[in-house]
Image: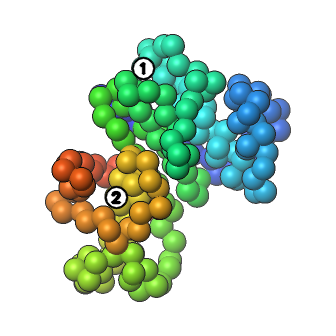
Amino acid sequence: MIQVFYCISGERLDVTLYNYLLNKVPPVYQEEIAQFRKWEDRQHRVLGKMLLITGLEILGITGYSLNQLQFTNLKRPYFNKLLDFNISHSGKYVVCAISTQAEIGVDVEEIKNIPVTDFTNEFSAEEMKSILSSDYSLHSFYSLWTKKEAFLKAIGTGLHVPLNKVHVIDNKICWEDREWFLTKLNFDKNY
């Protein structure tokens, strides 16, 4: 089972509500969150933790708390092999995926008008050709980018592995003798 929870965080939360949610997070994470300069980054991180806590409650998964989080050497958070989750945020969205059956990654990106050709080194020549020949090259770029980044988050490396080392074929990635399956989530045409 994989469940995805998300919230819209376009406006700054009322300070009372923000502090209420922040106080539900263990002090170690409160200190970490406080280090972020922008209110949006602090708020997204609090909401990500709340999505995880709320998602576990909704799914009836008990026995887990944020105090039990462990981290890989590359700082990917996890509970144990029986439960995996991943959190992403961009623009006004915060997304949390939770699974009791597989290692997972999730990525959301706000589609901004960027020069796609600036990212040529992140894709194979074939991938870049496909992006540039698409009727909607910006959407094609972001679709492929988020697939690769979600995968790298799932395996716990994040962008420590260059995106051009990851090849998406028919919504699958083969990596170290394992197949990884990708699913696109459509909840906003601008993301």
- Residue sitting at the far front: 73
- Image coordinates of residue 57 in percent, x first then y, are 50, 18
Q: Residue at x 50, y 79 (%)?
A: 114
Lower sequence index among marks 2 and 1: 1
Q: Nearer the viewer, residue 109 or 150?
A: 150
Q: Are marks 2 and 1 in contact (CB under 8 Å)?
A: no
- Report x, y in % for residue 125: 26, 83
Residue ID for mark 2 = 147
Here the colouring is: rainbow
Q: Is residue 12 left or right of residue 140?
A: right
Secondary structure under badge 1? loop
Q: Which mark is residue 59?
A: 1
Q: Is disc 1 surrounded by few (<14), some (14 to 19) or many (20+) residues within 10 Å?
A: few
At horizontal 24% and vertical 63% (from top left) the residue drawn is 168
Quadrant in the picture for residue 65: top right
Distance of mark 2 from mark 1, alpha carbons? 25 Å
The amino acid type, in three-letter code, at marker 2 is Lys
